[in-house]
Image (spheres, helix red, strand yellow):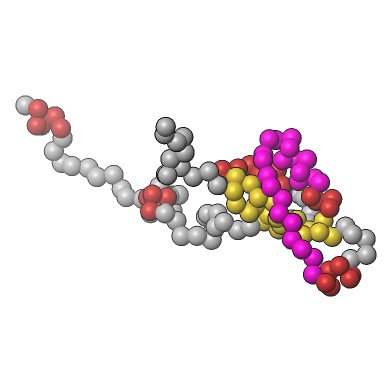
Amino acid sequence: MSSIIQNNQVFNNEIPFCRVYSVESKKQLEERFLAHRISYFIEWQDKSFFQRLFDRSGSKIVCTFKINRGEIARAKALAQGIEGIKFKDYGEEKNTERIRKRSDSVVKESDGLEMPELKFETSQDDYEE
């Protein structure tokens, strides 16, 4: 009997998406993810002694939301505007900060230094005769 799972299949595409530092922010993010069908996992971090000592209200937390690698762009758009969230940096390309790729530099904006159109003395009609 053969197995369904092959060696080259990878199922664990879960990556840390963001860190949340308040209960209210966690609730808002959970509601948005559930409404837009983004699966997530919450990994809780233990509080240090000083965090427990100085947090009287209990509203401060530290947890990490983990999501599927393919949902990063959608989840980031949903999480915009929620306070108390720190996103993980995965090196997203920004045109202002990164060097352009070769294919992007070939198709670039006009800078006024365009090549003039070449004109030849002989025309195509001369060769047809």
Residue extending farthest to the bottom is 50
- x%, y% of residue 104? 42, 50
- x%, y% of residue 105? 40, 53
Q: Residue at x 55, y 54 (%)?
A: 92
Quadrant (top left/top right/bottom left/bottom right) for the C terminus: top left
Location of residue 35 by image quarter = top right
State the residue in front, 59 or 72: 59
Instruction: Judge whether residue 125 can be spotted in this image.
Output: yes
Quadrant (top left/top right/bottom left/bottom right) for the N terminus: top left
Q: Residue at x 84, y 60 (%)?
A: 60
Residue extending farthest to the left is 129
Q: How many marks?
A: 0
Instruction: Judge whether residue 77 can be spotted in this image.
Output: no
State the residue in front, 106 or 88: 88
Q: Is residue 57 left or right of residue 99?
A: right
State the residue in front, 79 or 20: 20
Q: Is residue 7 left or right of residue 28?
A: left
Determine if the magenta segment contains residue 64.
Answer: no
Residue extending farthest to the top is 129
Q: Residue at x 70, y 43 (%)?
A: 78
Residue extending farthest to the front is 1
Determine if the magenta segment contains residue 43.
Answer: yes
- x%, y% of residue 59? 88, 57
State the residue in front, 56 or 111: 56
Height in image: 49 above or below 32?
Answer: below
Height in image: 38 above or below 82?
Answer: above
Q: Residue at x 68, y 35 (%)?
A: 37
Q: Which residue range is magenta in the image?
A: 27-48
Location of residue 31 by image quarter = top right
